[in-house]
Amino acid sequence: MLFSRLVQVSQEVAATSARSRKIALLGDLFRAADAADVPVVIPYLAGRLPQGRLGIGWKLLDQGVPPASDPGLSVLDVDARLTAIGSVTGTGSQAERRRLVGELLASATADEQRFLFGLLTGEVRQGALDAVAVEGLAEATGAPPADVRRAVMLAGSLQTVAQALLAEGPGALERFRLTVGRPVQPMLAQSASSVAEALGKLGACAVEEKLDGIRVQVHRDGGTVRIHTRTLDDITDRLPEITSAALELKGERFVLDGEVIALDEAGRPRSFQETAGRVGSRVDVATAAAAVPVSPVFFDALSVDGQDLLDLPFAERHAELARLVPEPMRVRRALAEGPEDLAEAEEFLAKTLGRGHEGVVIKALDAPYSAGRRGASWLKVKPVHTLDLVVLAAEWGHGRRTGKLSNLHLGARNADGSFAMLGKTFKGMTDAMLAWQTERLRELAVEEKGYVVTVRPELVVEIAYDGLQRSTRYPAGVTLRFARVVRYREDKRPEEADTVETLLAAHPEVRP
């Protein structure tokens, strides 16, 4: 496929707000694509590089190279050239990378150059998100959209499903099943403002502790255990105690959903940073495990003894979990019939907070497991307002923060995939956090004007705030009140950040 075709579709998708038109455009593009193009086409449309960060910033791109008059680059040619640029290291690498970037730009038309600039600096945000791409893929191949969505959830990769569909047709979807050893995207929870709101929406439900740990999916097949994060990374080698715990369970073949958390001697949770640091430790795992041991806490069963449980009601899935996992390894919970049990549910929340956890997740007993989706049948309730936002820029500090990137510009996702700034904050940061974020944000920098450093929108940060107020200074018409940093969420992608619409829905009193 010519690169120019992808660029044209990207522009047309960006120019329309109609979901049906986006789907039609992507459907036409997929019909014209070869299966081999898919691993590049899909990430490019979403503004991602298959290779990850390549370290190609404005200094390398801003060479003033005249564009080509006619399109000649293919999608795979662009991918190969970027791979070659990313592999250049050693003495003279900067000059060689500059030469290769210049050659690529010289082969690109003006429109292609603009797309490459946006792609390489993280500015391609035209709304061609994976959910729309799934619909476009279904339209291109004649497969039922629901079947394509389920296959993507179970495969954990839109590209993998797209390649199979384009090469083999709708029949290829049959092989995408829940398989022990192959992680699936986890089900996520929406937010509720209170226990009363959640009970009113869900009816009969379970009220479970919300732990401040790291989400894991544990697969066991006989004597083999694999552990995956919510982003499907394999972290088995980092958590030997979780492997041992899984091998002690009664079943021989299962997939369990849960969290790992570090607890102190009194059984209270240690800080999230300690848990995250332990899970992220790759060197001298034995020493790290001795210093900060982690414990598994399971709350769902996706497969047991070869039976796929995803479509079963949560009550039945939990019965399988209870049969397999002893109570000390299961999340604490209470059952509620509905709003009439509000007092008991609120008491459970209070006790959970007293044990040092961050809130509760309230789950409908009749709901299936919606892998990869933020389902309305799981509602999380926390005592403070928090958002997962993306850092758009930062300002150099002054006084004791001189030399540190301090004041963060915070953005929430728009419906089209762009980000709307909601305000700034310099509060809640320790000296260690300031040092870390300065280094990390400088790696993401794309422009520096005066004291403001604009960065690629890749870093997710959890922000606590006291409320919203109307503001004409910001594009969403609102700004955060008393925003402060809780922690960075490197386990989350910018696509998982909270949306402007979700924020406004939670605060109808200030909707512009």
Image: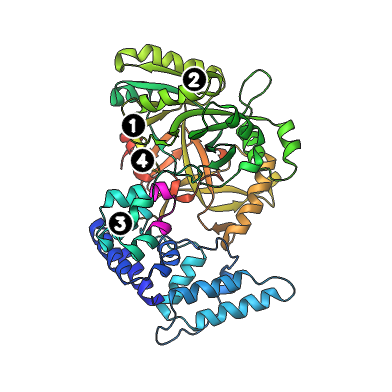
Disc 1 residue type? Answer: Leu
Q: Give the range drawn in magenta.
A: 152-161
Q: Name the residue under label 4.
A: 502
Front of the two marks 1 and 4: 1
Front of the two marks 2 and 4: 2
**Residues tagged 4 and 3 counted as in contact (Cβ below 8 A):** no
- Residue 312, label in figure: 1
Q: As rendered, which of 453 and 13 lies closer to the eye? A: 13
Number of callouts in the render? 4
Residue 410 x %, y %: 49, 47
- Residue 171, label in figure: 3
- Residue 332, label in figure: 2
Disc 2 residue type? Answer: Arg
Residue 148 x %, y %: 32, 52
Query: Left or right: where does residue 259 sit relative to residue 200?
Result: right
The residues bearing labels 4 and 3 have C-alpha atoms spaced at a distance of 37 Å
Query: Left or right: where does residue 273 sit relative to residue 338?
Result: right
The residues bearing labels 1 and 2 have C-alpha atoms spaced at a distance of 21 Å
Question: Which secondary structure class fits the magenta region best?
Answer: helix
- Residue 398, label in figure: none
Q: What element carries label 1?
A: loop
Q: Classify mark 3: residues with Cα within 10 Å, few (<14), some (14-19) or many (20+).
A: few
Image point (33%, 35%), residue name? 311
Image point (34%, 51%), residue name? 174
The residues bearing labels 3 and 1 have C-alpha atoms spaced at a distance of 25 Å
